[in-house]
Amino acid sequence: MLPRYPAHMSKTTVIILCVVGGILLLGLTCVGGVVGLGIWAGTQPPPEGITLDMDLPDAVYAGDSFDLVLTIRNDKPNDRSLMDVDFWSPLLDGVTVSSVDPKPNRVDDNFWPTYIFNQTIPANGELVITFSALADAPGVYAGELDISVDSIMSILSTQQAITIYNAEDKP
């Protein structure tokens, strides 16, 4: 009869190797799942009938207060739901947001600012969100602005930039 494990290894060594192998397999499966989910989410079409505009003043100088206005349009004949707004770094790196109207349900700032809304975008209408901010430092801050509509996996993504000029250059 053949031994159940190699003769030169103790039963304890075989058990430890099996446990370590199982943990590695589980870890690879989890990482693969997260990567796969990210790839899947990145290939999903944007929500149909939704457009997004970001408006800023023509010139923003360091030290200025200003409004960053998002207009989300719904061209469909049914109400839609804005789940959240994500500002990917470094888009807001040069500003401090002091208030938001309408007020979000909560703000998550784990890796980038995410404003959770669950606001209705009316049928054939629009939702306007105003972010009141202070320009902290001069520079060009560019990044993705994402909105999730009806589901956190239904994302409209746009590239945006905020240019903040030196306060000394203000006319």
Image: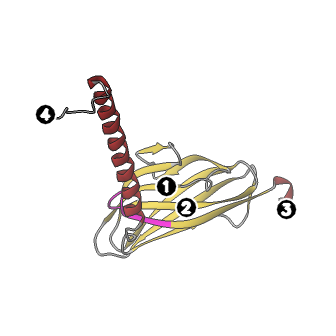
Label 3 crowd (10 A; few <14 / some 14-19 / many >=20): few
Quickly name the residue at label 1.
86
Q: Earlier in the sequence, mark 4 or mark 3?
A: 4
Looking at numbered disc 2 in the image, what kind of residue is underneath it?
Glu
Q: Earlier in the sequence, mark 4 or mark 1?
A: 4
Q: Earlier in the sequence, mark 3 or mark 2?
A: 2
Q: Residue furthest front?
A: 1
Quickly name the residue at label 4.
1
Marks 1/3 in contact by CB < 8 Å: the verdict is: no
Q: Secondary structure at mark 1?
A: strand
Looking at numbered disc 1 in the image, what kind of residue is underneath it?
Asp
> Closer to the camera, 30 or 14?
14
Marks 3/2 in contact by CB < 8 Å: the verdict is: no
Q: Earlier in the sequence, mark 2 or mark 1?
A: 1
Quickly name the residue at label 3.
171
Looking at numbered disc 4 in the image, what kind of residue is underneath it?
Met
